[in-house]
Image (cartoon, rainbow, N blue to C red):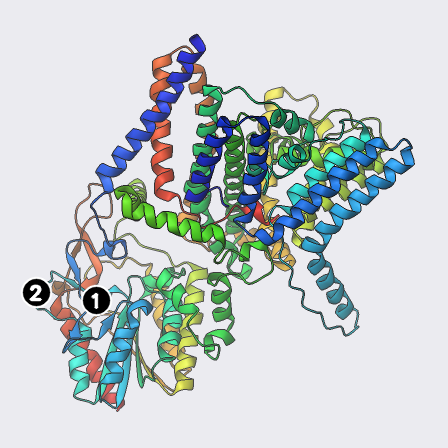
Amino acid sequence: MKTTTKEIKHLSSLLMGLVLSLTILNAMFVGKNTDFEELALNQETVSVYPGHDGITIHCKGASDSAQCISGFKQSKLSHAALWLGNSQLHAVNQYVTGQKTASYILHGKLRSSDTYLTTFSQPNSSLSEQFILYEYLSSQANFDYLILPLVFDDLREAELRQDIISALSLIPQTSLLFNTKLGRALIDRYSPATDQTEVTQTNLLLRDKSEEALNHWLSNNTSIWNTRSEARGSIMTFLYRLRNTAFGITASTKRPMIKTRYEQNITALKEILSSAEQKGTKVIMYIAPIRNDVPLPYIESEYLTFKNQMSNISTLYSNVLYVTFEDIITASLWGQKDSTVVGGKKEIDFMHFQAAGHMILAEQLFSVIKSTH
Amino acid sequence: MLFNSVTYLLFLFVIVTLYWTLPRTPRLYLVFLSSITFYGFWKFTFVPVMLASVICDYFIAKRIYSEKQKLAKKYWLIISLIFNLGLLFYFKYLIFFTDSAFGLANMIGLQADPFILNIILPIGISFYTFQTISYTVDVYRGFIKPENNFILFASYVTFFPQLVAGPILRAVEVIPQLDKRPTFKLSSFENGIRRIIFGLFLKVVLADNLAPLVDSGFSTSVDNLSAVDVWTLAFLFGFQIYFDFCAYSHIALGSARLMGIQFPENFNYPYLATSPREFWKRWHISLSSWIRDYLYLPLVGEKVQDRSVGGLANVTQQKEKSKNIALFSTWAIMGLWHGANWTFMIWGLYHAICIYIYRILAPVAHHWSKKTKHVCGWMITLPTMMLGWIPFRCESLNDTFQMYLLILQPGAYTWLGMRENVYLVTALVLLLFISYYFISRYLKHFVQNKPIARIVGDTVLYTIAISFTVVFLRPINQFIYFQF
């Protein structure tokens, strides 16, 4: 009898744990739908992906690229321009309804020059990702211009997001991607393995089919299963904030360059420029605007080396025009972002500016492109 | 079927329910057929390969037992070994040895075009092959009698909780348990569920979240890594593979426990080992003891007396030379067992060297106090064992040697090549691992006579583990040891 009581006590812990965990998950995450890719923008900044005459001209990535590409193909303009970049292109600080992004303004201006501009931007987009995206997009359309912002902060990124990984398998074998060391390394790393081990034989196995069916059923019939990605994102965000709080990391904290990632991205840049040169595409490469009335969140010497290196690289290619836009947006046109630490104050946003800043960027770019005609 | 999937959890629920409702014979059929189904969820075409191994050893073991002459017994044993190792060689090593032979031919100037072999490695072949070999050898040695009931024997070899990644079980450990109807015990059942939840937590929350950091680090060109990065990656992969494999073992043990069957433990805090020898008594214990009993001791010429204690034991009264030859041969084979690549061979030899050095140096510390020996031993053993994972994870010999060379260069310690988070996560995992061991020991003692505290503590642990497991449960990565 004593043993039975003990056993029941153990089992009661298990059952209470089960009930508690499901209750907590339900209370914390059900009904929420956070876009974690855009989380860094916070409440101060809004993402805007504009269209022109009902046609999308600014896309998020490979997954929605068909809309942008078909828009260009349907237009009767003679030239095409492609603008790749990070959230600076689609985020407007202190946004007021009706305000326009640089991509929209530049699209309108270039139309008058018989050029159709399509923009693709993803948060923290690295040059490695842009290399793949460029190869993917240029396999579907010929671009006369490629506009490429250079953001020092994004050279700390080296991973590929799912959208870009999906594009890898859609790029034709004739692409430069397959003939470069970096391209092959990225394909090897992110494509499904192709050797003879059983690890590779996972596609469309019975276990995959059953798992898909069960997950589908659980998603449709339980509220918790559907919110698991929300919970995962929230946990990761909490850990990120916890780390920032523990180490006192804010938006203004100086980020050192990461050698391996930096060099991978520089290689990617060179591949983009080579590929564009082969395709006869003119490249406008610019140092992205940054708020500079306060100390930069970079180590100055590294940032200076980066700019010099960009300038030097541009001279290696006949099709590249290099400009620096780092100072074009005045301090008053920048804004703040929510704190990246737990319970902290608002912090300086070094990346996203207000609508007036978008206007300035579009005008500057337009005059540069015009000068290349 | 993957343990870290909803499919498996549903499958287990159905099988366990049926298991406890059926009488002996139908229950055995249920175990056998469910194991075949479990395997078939990967590929049904490879079920016959596994069954061939089962049938072969079922009949050969009986034949060995019935033969009167020692020589005839030996012939039958050799046939069994040729068959089992032949299967393993064909599926696992043919491509490797063919490629190596062509590589060597080209290196010495003979122009040879390699032909392409497309052989799929049947999942779990290394495990069930070792299991059938141990059965036949044990019958040959006279340790056990052959099993007459084919379904019982087949259930032992194919028993789904241990089928694809161990623990490697001896017949004597499992067949008697499968044969008798176990008594249902609520405590055993609760323990099984506890282990499954804990295993899933280790796999989907820890191992799978470390995997992207490890993959990213090891796919970086070695030229872009610093010595600190190499150390970090060694530790990080060391923890990833530990969480991953330990998770598999927990789920395997837990699943068997739900059916009233007890497997021996496969892990015992290996990273707290104070010597390389002790490490192998704590890591993948069933493989270490298998290697010792069926390979190392026969090579040394020592008679096998005990079983499943674990670790490559330091045998006594043998000639140093034969001991060393056996040590290095055993480890080279142990390395190749893990994978058909020279990097695994290097991994094996690395451990052989570690144990060899330990044998030489151990007497030096003989007069040290126990505490000093433990602390110093742990501080040397942990990084040494972690560095051993480099060839295990590297894609090529070139990368392996380059990484080892890096850690010997003082100048390579002056910069960092990876994201700050990687170092932070590694340090945190190491800290948590050690803290968990000591805190859980303390808490176990603390709650011993406090039932309320125990219930509260268990409830909190279950709540955390279940919440995180539900959130992270996705079969995105299969278990690392599935490839062996």
Is residue B5 among what the camera can see?
Answer: no
Residue type, numbered disc 2: Thr
Rendered residue at 18%/50% (across/down): A338
Q: Secondary structure at mark 2?
A: loop
Tell me if residue B259 comes above or below residue A317 in the rendering: above
For the residue pair B401 and B71, the one nearer the viewer reads as B71
- Across and down, in percent, residue B467 comes to 33, 36
Q: Locate residue B32: give its quadrant.
A: top right
Rendered residue at 55%/26% (across/down): B23
Tag 2: Cα neighbours inside 10 Å, few (<14), some, or many (≥20)?
Answer: few
Q: Earlier in the sequence, mark 1 or mark 2?
A: 1
Chain holding disc 2 = A
Tell me if residue B451 comes above or below residue A258 in the rendering: above
Is residue B58 among what the camera can see?
Answer: yes
| Residue highlighted by disc 2 | A97
The tag on residue A90 is 1
Rendered residue at 38%/74% (across/down): A136
For the residue pair B479 and A338, the one nearer the viewer reads as B479
Image check: B369 left or right of A78? right
For the residue pair B219 and A305, the one nearer the viewer reads as B219
Tag 1: Cα neighbours inside 10 Å, few (<14), some, or many (≥20)?
Answer: many
Chain holding disc 1 = A
